[in-house]
Image (cartoon, grey):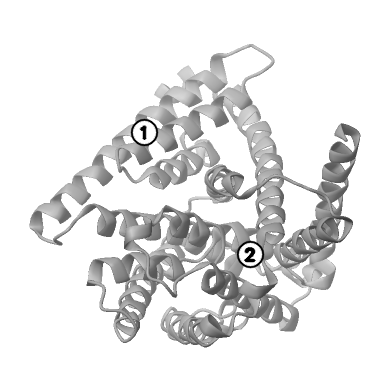
Amino acid sequence: MTATIILTLCSLLLIAYLFDLSAAKTRIPSVILLLLLGFAVHRITDFLGLALPDFSPALEVLATIGLVLIVLEGSLELELHRSKITLVSKAFIGVVISIILLSFFYAYLFHFVTNQPLKIRLLNAIPLSIISSAIAIPSVKNLLPINREFVIYESSLSDIVGVLFFNFVARNAVFGIEAFADFGLSIVFMTVISLVATVGLSLFLSKINHHIKFAPIILMVIVIYEVSKVYHLPALLFILLFGLALGNLHLLSKKKWMQRFKPEILDREVTKFKELSIEAAFLIRVLFFLLFGYLIEAKNVMNPDTLIWSLAIVLIIFLVRAVQIWLSKLPIIPLLFVAPRGLITILLFISIAPIQSIWFVNKALITQVIILTAFVMMFGLMINKKTPEVEKSTPVPTE
């Protein structure tokens, strides 16, 4: 039995790797193939009559670790240049406006079905308004550099802003001055923690001579993230700032105080850390979407009670996105289609207390929205006429 489990798991991970390799040619996001593979595995185990344990408790654990690693991976890849201030500003403003607009619009629509107060309707609406960096970032590897960077910034910021907004609504019964002041202080406090932690972990990375140094850093990042969540602090802000700082240490290499960090050694170690983060994020992402696909039930995919709602939600997502991209003066195609819902939507949906849930915002609706947005993204990437060769030859703006 042990050999069977090991062989099956390794085979599934290798198949997932082939999906990732083929994505550049087929333009089919690997996440869709992973969901289908997980769904097929469940059907096969049922057909063979295999009695397997309930894996659903592992979904939240994988989602949390995956979110940390994926945001870290994305932020490590981002380079800070003055020329990119405009791009980051467009991404941030677009994310804030779209999340707030979609959340309140969905909450307004939910009012026609339920008499729940605005706070509860917002809690159920926010997860549906957030772009999933776990799906978006690995799916845009073959876009033009400027479009790819926009998606990385946008989806990472969407995770952070969405979680901040969700926690703000969940923590406050009344949205008054005191609530906003507390919210602002938590951001300032988390920024200070991020700077201190970044300095400390950077020193550890440059000074330690032990052959194991990257695993403790990743574990410490996850620990800081979880402790910050317990105290209702914007934990993802730490991940973003830490990744941006490590990924752009070359900007500080000529500073005198930076010599204490041994910049030559640190730069080499950061490169290795990036590689390990990418590998770890790949494994966790694959396991998460395989498990999510495994847990998908056919009755949820085709549930007629929620399908009309799912279609309406997805339509609104892309109508708002079309306006957002147009106002940002960015290319409509393929960016219009890159607005998937996924890991962060599931994570926030799971965290809603049963007493605060709305009956029709259920597993079926969440599953349908995730699948529909993933297929829309696949369609958009497939009709994108730019080839990888053209993209690689496109110059990246420099400072």
Residue at coordinates 65% horizontally, 29% vertically from top-left? 268
Above-or-below relation of 215 to 240:
above
Q: What's under tag 2, amino acid-wise?
A: Pro
Q: x, y (%) of residue 178?
A: 10, 53
Which quadrant of the view contains residue 377?
bottom right
Q: Secondary structure at mark 2?
A: helix
Would residue 353 appear left or right of 213 to someone viewing this image? Answer: left
Front residue (pair 362, 31): 362
Q: Quadrant of the N terminus?
A: top right
Is residue 254 something that shows in the picture? Answer: no
Residue at coordinates 42% horizontally, 53% vertically from top-left? 351
Q: x, y (%) of residue 317?
A: 47, 80
Front residue (pair 251, 69): 69
Q: Secondary structure at mark 1?
A: helix
Q: Measure the alpha-carbon separation of dots 2 and 1.
A: 29 Å
Would residue 239 appear left or right of 390 to someone viewing this image? Answer: left
Q: Mark 2 vs mark 1: which is more N-terminal? A: 2
Residue at coordinates 57% horizontally, 45% vertically from top-left? 57
Above-or-below relation of 155 to 68:
below
Q: x, y (%) of residue 303?
A: 60, 80
What residue would you read off at disc 2? 145
Q: What's under tag 1, amino acid-wise?
A: Leu
What residue would you read off at disc 1? 195
How many numbered tags mark residues here? 2
Which quadrant of the view contains residue 149?
bottom right
